[in-house]
Image: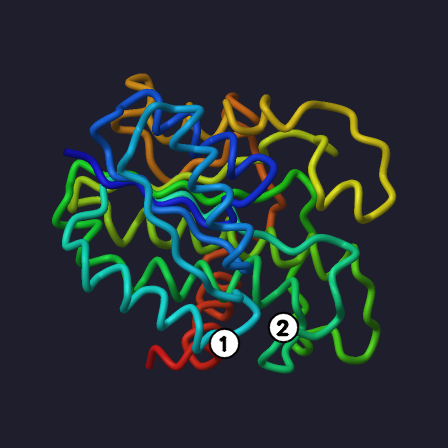
């Protein structure tokens, strides 16, 4: 019996992907995460109703707090020693507050540090469930990491903060795929679509160009498609493999990012 974990699943793409995956395998346990308990309870009921799957569990954590991310991992591992699919879907957009609960830049924390920490803490359960998959939801919007000021304290810009955090997640994807290549765990990243009709896009005052469902379909494709059974360390533009910002292929840059990240997440 499969265990599937989707972060940021209380609305938009994450919620629709959770419904789709729960419906595909009604015996699977679906773990969904959100920031708001009341909203999470509503979503659990909606997923059960729409998918016909009763095995839905919810966990609350604010990803701008790394302590809450650690607690989330502890709580999930207490109940689950096997995780077949992890979809790091939670994200903070252009319009999110500049600083989160930890006092760090919100986008870098939520979009990159939180999934980096959560994934590493859950790795024992993910490896035990092999063949298993990790899907990191990134973006086609990418910009080089400013290693001298990853939190952009000097020249802050919400869009740059977002695009930098999304490239960081892709760099982590490439590193982790290499690390897990002998463990029968695949790790891939994707851009689910440009300006989809989600709260994140609407909150930024941007006119949507596509449906949230199309983004959910892309996530489900990466998480379940037989075509991708042995594909790892790749980036997909929706469902098609694509190239990313050149910095992601720079081993020295990835090593530098990893060193900074391990320190910020207390994993060293």
Q: Is residue 152 above or below residue 179?
A: below
Which mark, residue 232? none
Q: Which residue is label 2 attached to?
A: 147
Residue 172: quadrant of the picture: bottom left
The way the protein has been coloured in the rendering is: rainbow
**SS for callout 1:** helix
- Mark 2 Cα-neighbour bin, 10 Å: few <14, some 14–19, many ≥20: few
Q: Is residue 76 above or below residue 191?
A: below
Residue 228 point in image, percent of width and height = 33, 24
Mark 1 vs 2: CB contact within 8 A: yes
Residue 164: quadrant of the picture: bottom right
Q: In this view, does 207 lie above or below 11?
A: above
Q: Which residue is label 1 attached to?
A: 260
Q: Can residue 85 be seen in this view?
A: no
The furthest residue to the top: 227
**SS for callout 2:** loop
Query: Gap in Å between the C-alphas at discs 1 and 2?
Result: 9 Å
Left of 105 or right of it: where is 30? left
Question: At x 38% / y 51%, what residue is drawn?
Answer: 58
Q: In this view, does 99 lie above or below 158?
A: below
- Mark 1 Cα-neighbour bin, 10 Å: few <14, some 14–19, many ≥20: few
Residue 84 point in image, percent of width and height = 23, 40
Question: At x 33% / y 36%, what residue is drawn?
Answer: 232
Q: Who comes first in sequence, dot 1 or dot 2?
A: 2
Which of the pair 175/219 is nearer the observer? Answer: 219
Question: At x 32% / y 41%, what residue is drawn?
Answer: 56
Which of the pair 212/246 is nearer the observer? Answer: 212
């Amino acid at each position: 019996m499969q265990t599937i974990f989707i972060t940021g699943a209380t609305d938009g793409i994450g919620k629709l992907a959770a419904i789709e995956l729960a419906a595909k395998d009604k015996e699977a346990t679906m773990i969904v995460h959100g920031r708001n308990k009341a909203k999470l309870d509503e979503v659990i009921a909606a997923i059960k109703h729409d998918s016909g799957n009763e095995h839905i569990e919810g966990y609350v954590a604010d990803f701008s707090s790394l302590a809450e991310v650690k607690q989330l991992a502890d709580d999930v591992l207490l109940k689950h020693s096997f995780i077949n699919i992890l979809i790091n879907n939670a994200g903070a957009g252009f319009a999110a507050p500049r600083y989160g609960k930890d006092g760090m830049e919100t986008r870098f924390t939520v979009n990159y540090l939180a999934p980096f920490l959560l994934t590493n803490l859950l790795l024992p359960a993910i490896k035990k469930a092999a063949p298993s998959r990790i899907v990191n939801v990134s973006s086609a919007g990418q910009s080089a990491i400013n290693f001298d000021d990853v939190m952009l304290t000097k020249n802050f810009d919400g869009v740059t903060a977002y695009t930098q955090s999304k490239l960081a997640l892709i760099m982590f994807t490439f590193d982790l795929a290499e690390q897990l290549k002998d463990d029968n765990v695949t790790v891939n990243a994707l851009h689910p679509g440009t300006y989809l009709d989600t709260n994140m896009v609407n909150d930024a005052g941007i006119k949507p160009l596509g449906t949230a469902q199309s983004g959910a379909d892309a996530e489900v494709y990466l998480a379940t498609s037989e075509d991708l059974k042995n594909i790892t360390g790749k980036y997909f533009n929706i469902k098609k493999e694509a190239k990313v910002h050149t910095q992601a292929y720079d081993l020295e840059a990835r090593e530098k990012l990893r060193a900074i990240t391990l320190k910020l997440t207390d994993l060293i």
